[in-house]
Image (cartoon, grey):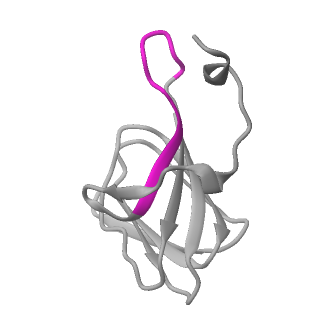
């Protein structure tokens, strides 16, 4: 294991962002510790342009998504009930693994956030 795999400091601007299947916007993982003996931690950066709707999706990990810039609306489904809430700079959206969710950019500024999954 080299020293860069043990500890580092990076800007979220350094994350290699790209399109991801089934989720609109640009996303990139800065940390992914999901191998044998690892904690299962994932740290991802996301950027969504004004008017973008991510699309309904789910994943097995619990997740917290912290918004740094922009405004949006998150929706999630539990059983046959749907919920929604506004998000903006300094707000966080949490959901357990397996919960279908969606995010839409509602403002005229790019939405930038960091997601942590475990």
Q: In this view of the protein, which residue sits in the foreground, 28 or 35? A: 28
Give the percent coordinates (x, y) of residue 49: 47, 78
Question: Compared with residue 107, is residue 59 higher up or lower down, i.e. above or below?
Answer: above
Residue 10 occupies which quadrant of the picture? top right
Which residue ends up furthest to the bottom in the rendered image? 108
In this orientation, does residue 65 appear? Answer: no
Give the percent coordinates (x, y) of residue 105: 48, 79
Q: Residue at x 37, y 51 (%)?
A: 99
Question: Compared with residue 105, is residue 101 higher up or lower down, i.e. above or below?
Answer: above
Name the side, left or right, on which 32 lies relative to 24. Answer: right
Q: In this view of the protein, which residue sits in the foreground, 103 or 6? A: 6
Does the magenta portion include 36?
yes
In this orientation, does residue 111 appear? Answer: yes
Q: Residue at x 46, y 44 (%)?
A: 96
Task: Name the image quarter holding the N terminus.
Answer: top right
Give the percent coordinates (x, y) of residue 36: 42, 11
Residue 102 occupies which quadrant of the picture? bottom left
Give the percent coordinates (x, y) of residue 95: 49, 50
Question: Compared with residue 34, is residue 60 higher up or lower down, i.e. above or below?
Answer: below
Q: In this view of the protein, which residue sits in the foreground, 87 or 24? A: 24
Name the side, left or right, on which 60 lies relative to 43. Answer: left
Which contiguous range is marked in magenta?
A: 26-39
Q: Residue at x 74, y 37 (%)?
A: 9
Q: How many marks?
A: 0
Q: Residue at x 73, y 66 (%)?
A: 90
Does the magenta portion include 81?
no
């Amino acid at each position: 294991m080299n020293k860069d795999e043990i500890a580092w400091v990076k800007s979220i601007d350094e994350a290699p962002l790209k399109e991801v299947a089934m989720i609109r916007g640009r996303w990139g993982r800065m940390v992914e510790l999901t191998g044998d003996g690892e904690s299962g931690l994932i740290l991802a950066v996301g950027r969504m342009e004004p008017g973008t709707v991510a699309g309904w999706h789910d994943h097995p990990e619990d997740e917290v998504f912290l918004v740094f810039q922009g405004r949006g609306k998150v929706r999630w489904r539990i059983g046959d009930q749907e919920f929604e809430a506004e998000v903006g700079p300094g707000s966080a959206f949490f959901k357990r693994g397996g919960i279908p969710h969606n995010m839409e950019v509602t403002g005229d500024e790019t939405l930038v956030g960091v997601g942590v999954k475990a």
